[in-house]
Amino acid sequence: MTRYRKQDPEMTRRRFINAAMGTTATVGIVSLVGVLGTANPVFRLTRDKMPPVEGDVLVHASASKEGEIIKPSELSEQLIRAWPMGKDKEGNNLIRKGDPNNVLAVFRYPKGQIVAPTNLEATIDGEIVAYSDICTHAGCSVSDDDQQEGQMKCPCHSGQYDPKRGCIVVGGPPPRPLAQLPIKMDGDKLVVAGFFLENPYPFTEAEWEARKEAVKAQLA
Amino acid sequence: MNQWLDERLHISRLNDKFLRKAFPVHHSFFLGEITLFSLIILIITGIVLALSYEPSNSLIVNSFDPGTADKPNLIPAAYHSALKINAMPFGDMLRRVHHWTANIMVAAAVIHMMRIYFTGAFKKPREINWWIGMLLLIFTALTAVTGYILPYDNYAYNTVKVVYGIAASIPWIGSWLAQAAFAGNFPGEGIIPRIYGYHIMLLPGILLALTGAHMLLMIKQKHTQPQYAKRIAYKKIVGVPLLTQQTPIMLMLTLLFAGIVLLFSAFIPVHPVEFFGPPSTTPIQNIKPDWYLLWVFGALAIIPSFELTIFGGIIGSEFVGAILLPTVVIAAMFAVPMLDRSKDNNYYAENPTNHPVRLAIGTSFMALLIIMSVAGYKPDLISANVLTTGNANTVLWILMFVVPAVTYFATIGIVRGIRALREADERESLAHSTAAADD
Ligand code: FES
């Protein structure tokens, strides 16, 4: 054995191939991330996509009566789906259904039945109450419960809510209650009195705060 | 002409290499072929459907029911084109064939994998093909899901909403990922073009590439040999060559299969878009995914609600039920070949009863998936008064553990019984043969 091992001054073929493959993979991944960036389009907060804002009028969302203003006399313990209707830049009526997550559920109960944790200040006389109709689980539209009168059930994974108690979850997988929307009377119309009290689906708390700020900034 | 072709294309080499590939003669070996034929039928019918489909969710006036000038009846273009396809001659039939074949493809793939698992065909040297097969299964399911979003009726709309919700439930990156995958906030203007791209370009491309790799490997490694081959010619490949013996069998199988699919399609309607109507705020009662995803749906239905915040990421029941749990199940299936420690190559399909533990694990795994799928029917079970809202979760959770356990031990017991009988048989015939020799 000699003390000197044979030193190959040149790169071995294997090392070259490994290095080349490594470089290709890195470049490839970086460019792929770039391409994925373009896959995600920018979101423009147009007025039809805004969440319900103060002053919006509640109109029917069901296909047969869409756009008709909801009268308090039509309301009952049966869920009525509603859209918020605001104004566009020219001041024309605009139903905010660009974001389908804006759909609302409106109920009317005899006085005294709506209790905490519902925010009674945000209801009309403790009788008429409005919530986001979007299940906090995976975003399905929540219906009346066909089993229990006066409760709500989500058809997707059978999440259940109690609309008389702030729409708390009484069954199934949803993580949070449905967000309550403050409303008030204006003549014979139901009018939105402010933003949702909690973050509605699909927003996290932080995202919801940011969205409220964005809406205020745009409308100011 | 043969010679002319041969001089240019070396047909004879191709013949030796591929066309003489030996196919084992056993009906369970047709399952993979059925999966392949389904893919071919799906591609052909899919191309024809794509010719009349309009991949856009922009609202247009419904030409079947235009409404009035000041209140036009607007529906998404994709939905409108689905209505138009139904109105063309054999259009509805075409959709049904496509739909049924998709279901059969998944079913055939699942049973094919069961055959591979129970006979030990995943063992060395075929592990890679098991993994490719798993990928094929996953991408087939994804292709199917993107497919039933395309008609963009109310059902599809609710489906994609839930799929979006699942993607968005991944902690930290969820909302970014969901927006990237579905072209913005749900339901963005580009959601249908995006899913159309997945369904007709990306996913079929992946499926074809994987299928090619799957089959090349299979040709290289040969099929596992059925048991009879061991008796006829040990360590030799036994079977009929692709050309000419297997080809007529395959053709017959294709025709038979196509016939069955057409019969199904003629009599059993699928996904009636007119019934579901265009996307709307009215939810569909008891909406369910297709049978092969029902187990995930069932898991979602019985997972209790919770929400954890870790480093700003939200981990909720949605993520655990629809992402984490299927990942665990799929990972377990991926790991199957690694649990086998044999060093030697496996040539022969094994008799499942000689491997009772593997058999029992397989059956109890299937029992688990079935129970989870039953859990998907929770609302229906409650409406039918089989369970109550109060006890449904408890009962289903208990069943989820008890039924697989019972299945496991029952399988082992049955296998023991079968083996005892077989051994008794052998002893008896041995006794007879020695008795006969004594005479
Ligand atoms: S979306 Fe409502 S329970 Fe899952």
Image: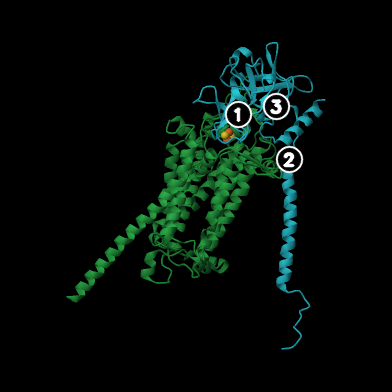
Q: Which residue is mark 2?
A: A41
The furthest residue to the right = A220
The furthest residue to the top = A187
Q: Is residue B382 among the parts visible in the rendering?
A: yes
Residues behind callouts 3 and 1 on a single chain:
yes
For the C terminus of chain A, the quadrant is top right
Q: Residues within 10 Å of mark 3 (few under 14, many from 20)?
A: some
In 3D space, how far apart are the residues under numbered discs 2 and 1 (Cα atoms)? 35 Å
Residue A168's disc is 1
Which chain contains the residue that carries disc 2? A
Give the secondary structure at mark 2.
loop
Ligand 1 falls in which quarter? top right
Circle 1: residue type: Ile
The furthest residue to the bottom = A1
Q: Is mark 2 within 8 Å of ligand 1?
A: no
Residue B403 in picture, x, y percent from top left: 43, 46
Which chain contains the residue that carries disc 1? A
Chain identifier of the green chain:
B
Of the pair B54 and A173, the residue shown nearer to us: A173
Give the secondary structure at mark 3.
loop
Which is nearer the N-term, disc 3 or disc 1?
1
Q: Which residue is mark 3?
A: A197
Residues behind callouts 2 and 3 on a single chain:
yes
Chain identifier of the cyan chain:
A
Give the residue at x 67% y 22%: A119
In 3D space, how far apart are the residues under numbered discs 2 and 3 (Cα atoms)? 29 Å
Give the residue at x 48% y 46%: B369
Which chain contains the residue that carries disc 3? A
Residue A190 in picture, x, y percent from top left: 68, 16
